[in-house]
Image (tube, grey):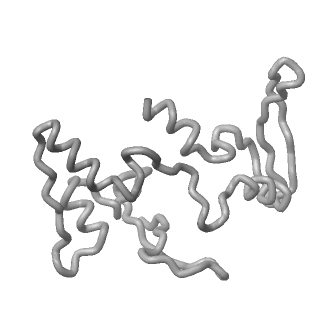
């Protein structure tokens, strides 16, 4: 069920496999024409127009894509999960506290054995932040880029 719902709730406006070309000025992509027997068509837009259309699918700050209702609603979650654990006869998991001086990447690696610093593509290089985009808001922790 999670795989099924995830395809709809966590997808991006356009997937990478539909992007065909970018020449620095225009973006070419594939789309499905439902008016003509769902034929695959190609469209070319200027980069500005493509980005404008893409950003129409980005939610404004403060909006949420998914909200939890019922027994998973945030105001009832702790009590309801405690009741579920009691009915199932399961102990609450011990909270895994971070070590002093340990950041989220170290904590994740200690818990899972996987490193967030390794490149997700090659698995060998390390992710390092080398530059901020002008006008971007500072984020903690900063977004990494690939460096070998």
Report the residue at 62% width, 67% height from top.
Answer: 61
Q: Report the side of 125 relative to 113 (left or right).
A: right
Front-most of 96 and 36?
96
What number of labels is visible?
0
Asked if residue 4 is positioned above or below residue 18 in the image, the reply reads above
Q: Report the side of 1 relative to 92 (left or right).
A: right
Report the residue at 59% width, 66% height from top.
Answer: 62
Report the residue at 41% width, 66% height from top.
Answer: 127
Asked if residue 49 is positioned above or below residue 36 in the image, the reply reads below
The x, y position of residue 82, in whole percent, is 21, 50
Locate residue 34: give its quadrant. top right
Locate residue 136: give its quadrant. bottom right
Q: Report the side of 101 relative to 2 (left or right).
A: left
Front-most of 25 and 86?
86
The x, y position of residue 92, in whole percent, is 15, 51
Asked if residue 18 is positioned above or below residue 57 in the image, the reply reads above
Q: Quadrant of the C terminus?
A: bottom left
Q: Quadrant of the N terminus?
A: top left
Name the outermost residue toward the top: 37
Report the residue at 17% width, 61% height from top.
Answer: 95
The x, y position of residue 35, in whole percent, is 88, 24
The x, y position of residue 65, in whole percent, is 57, 51
Asked if residue 50 is positioned above or below residue 135 in the image, the reply reads above
């Amino acid at each position: 069920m999670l795989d099924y719902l995830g395809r709809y709730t966590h997808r991006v406006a356009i997937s990478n496999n539909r992007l065909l070309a970018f020449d620095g000025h225009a973006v070419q992509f594939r789309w499905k024409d439902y008016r003509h027997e769902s034929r695959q068509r190609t469209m070319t837009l200027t980069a500005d127009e493509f980005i404008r259309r893409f950003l129409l699918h980005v939610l404004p700050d403060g909006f949420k894509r998914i909200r939890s209702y019922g027994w998973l609603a945030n105001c009832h979650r702790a009590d309801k999960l405690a009741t579920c654990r009691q009915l199932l006869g399961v102990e609450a998991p011990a909270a895994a506290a971070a070590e002093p001086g340990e950041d989220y990447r170290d904590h994740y690696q200690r818990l899972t054995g996987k490193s967030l610093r390794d490149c997700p593509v090659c698995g060998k290089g390390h992710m390092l932040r080398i530059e901020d985009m002008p006008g971007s808001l500072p984020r903690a922790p900063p977004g990494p880029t690939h460096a070998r």
